[in-house]
Image: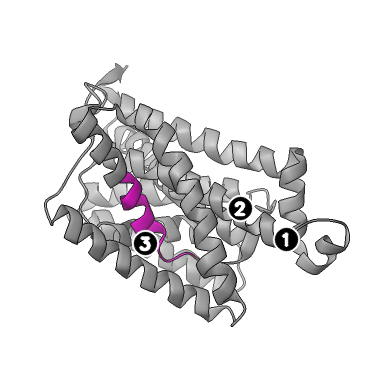
Amino acid sequence: MDNLNQLIQGVLLGGYYALLACGLSFMYGVMRMINLAHGSLAIVAAYALFFLADRWEIHPFVGLLVVVPAMAAFGWLLHRLVLERSARSGALVPLLSTFGLAGILDNVMFQSFGADTRSLAPYIDTLSYDGFSLPGGLAVGHLSLLTFATAVVLLGGLQWFLHHTALGRRIRAASEDPATAELVGVNARATFALASAIALMTVGVAGAFLAMRATFDPYTGPMQLIFAFEAIIIGGPRSLWGTLAGGIVLGVAQSLGAKVHPQGFLIAGHVVFLGVLLARVSGLRPLAWLPRKRAA
């Protein structure tokens, strides 16, 4: 029964990783770009929510009504000012640009908020520690379950949006062939900027749950980026549902690894990631049972 409890906790943890990786997966699926500032941007959203809660006592869920549109606007500007221009110089330049942006964001947050850790847990009442018990002594936290449900809704919503709305079809068309899409009336430049805005909206949501479930500081972002990247690679870099599956596999591996050894939490996840990566390089298809629909 203890193993089953570890498995459940691992699945729920995987939901958090999938939520964290959602925006990164969407941006890569649409524009074939990897945003190395992804983790730092999630921490920016976390600090923004903390500032609203600490200064004006705005509940974090209410604060999302301000932070999510602000992140969307930042995503639009990020694409127009950084990603679009750097992409003209090849695939490597956007990586270097977002890497530099991550360093700037981390240091600006350090200068603004210091090195002290923060958390949104005190501002969400009992949600941070409440839960319910299942038969056999199994325990499920309300926040963990809410995080998992949010990941499923967000990833499923994006999948539906891409395949069943006119804007989603324009994004997919621009992703496939921007030049041809332009010939049929799709403004690829504006479409990609909008896709970046959507990706950053999901980052805002991920930052909120990151701050509610754990503490954070200005330099927490890079580690979150690693978890998100591992979830995407495990599940498949061009599949939104694969991102959910990859997050679950990573979470379960970490949970079971922690049971084997106290230091096994991170090691087990990294081992699974490296195993899947080597299998992909070798031409094998881990998680081949997943539907291989593209994210865009």
Q: Which residue is mark 2?
A: 195
- Disc 3 marks a residue whose amino acid type is Ile
Residue at 17 percent across and 44 percent down: it is: 118
- Disc 1 marks a residue whose amino acid type is Ala
Q: What is the total number of numbered labels drawn onto the structure image?
A: 3
Q: Which residue is mark 1?
A: 188
Q: Is residue 40 magenta?
A: yes
Q: Is residue 42 magenta?
A: yes
Question: Where, quadrant-wise, is the C terminus in this rendering?
Answer: bottom right
Is 222 displayed left or right of 230 in the figure?
left
Q: Give, as a single range, the part of the protein colored magenta.
A: 35-46
Q: Work out whether 117 lies above or below 139.
A: below
Residue in front for this viewpoint, 163 or 241: 163
Q: Which mark is residue 226?
A: 3
Task: Tell me where residue 151 appears, x and y as whole percent.
Answer: 48, 38
- Disc 2 marks a residue whose amino acid type is Ala
Q: CA distance from mark 3 to mark 1?
A: 30 Å
Q: Which structural element holds mark 1?
A: helix
Residue at 27 percent across and 58 percent down: it is: 266
Q: CA distance from mark 3 to mark 2?
A: 22 Å
Of the two numbered discs 3 and 1 on the same chain, state the one appearing first in sequence: 1
Q: Work out whether 244 lies above or below 147.
A: below
Is 206 displayed left or right of 167 in the figure?
left
